[in-house]
Image (tube, grey):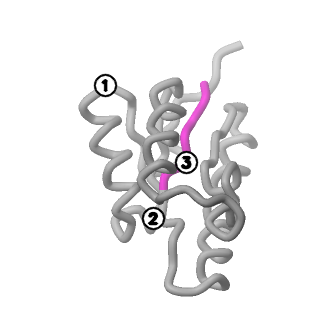
Amino acid sequence: MIIYISGKYTAPDRLKTLENIMYAEKFAIKVWETGHFAFCPHLNTRLFEDKCKIVPDEYVKADLMFLERCDGILMIPNWKDSPGAKIEHEFAKVNGIPIYYDVRDIPCPTT
């Protein structure tokens, strides 16, 4: 399965944003280690806000397009502090995408 990693990205300063990216990465690695594939938007557009001149809503729009193609979403512990993650959570709920709150809840992959 492809599991989308959802959690807080933006922070008041660059260092805290980097901490959020690295935090999400840890969960992506855990998902990979379970035998699933992780899509982590934090890594996909890492620090693009410094390099790419688009508005934050465009990132959310693109992320939802990725999420739509995933088999599940993992809500990492800091997700409730993120407006974007809350949007992703609601999108998953409305579209019937399985929502997981712990890596251990993701079903074992079948081969």
- Distance, label 1 to label 2, CA atoms, is 21 Å
Position of 30 with respect to 104 (left or right) is right
What number is the disc on residue 77?
A: 2
At 69% from the left and 38% from the top, the residue drawn is: 34
- Residue 52 visible in this rendered orientation of the protein: yes
- The residue that label 3 is drawn on is 5
Closest to the camera, between mark 1 and mark 2, is 1
At mark 3, the secondary structure is strand
At mark 1, the secondary structure is loop
Q: Position of residue 92 (x, y in %)?
A: 34, 35
| Depth check, front residue: 103 or 1 | 1
**Where is the C terminus found, in terms of image quarters?**
top right
Check the image and name the residue furthest to the left: 94
| Looking at the image, residue 10 lies above or below residue 90 | below
Q: Which residues are magenta?
A: 1-6
User: How busy is the neighbourhood of tag 2: few (under 14 within 10 Å), some, or many (20 plus)?
Assistant: some
User: How busy is the neighbourhood of tag 1: few (under 14 within 10 Å), some, or many (20 plus)?
Assistant: few
- Distance, label 1 to label 3, CA atoms, is 16 Å
Type of the residue with mark 3: Ile
What number is the disc on residue 96?
A: 1
Q: Earlier in the sequence, mark 1 or mark 2?
A: 2
Closest to the camera, between mark 2 and mark 3, is 3
At 37% from the left and 71% from the top, the residue drawn is: 81
Q: Are marks 1 and 2 in contact (CB under 8 Å)?
A: no
**Where is the N terminus found, in terms of image quarters?**
top right
Q: Position of residue 65 (x, y in %)?
A: 48, 31
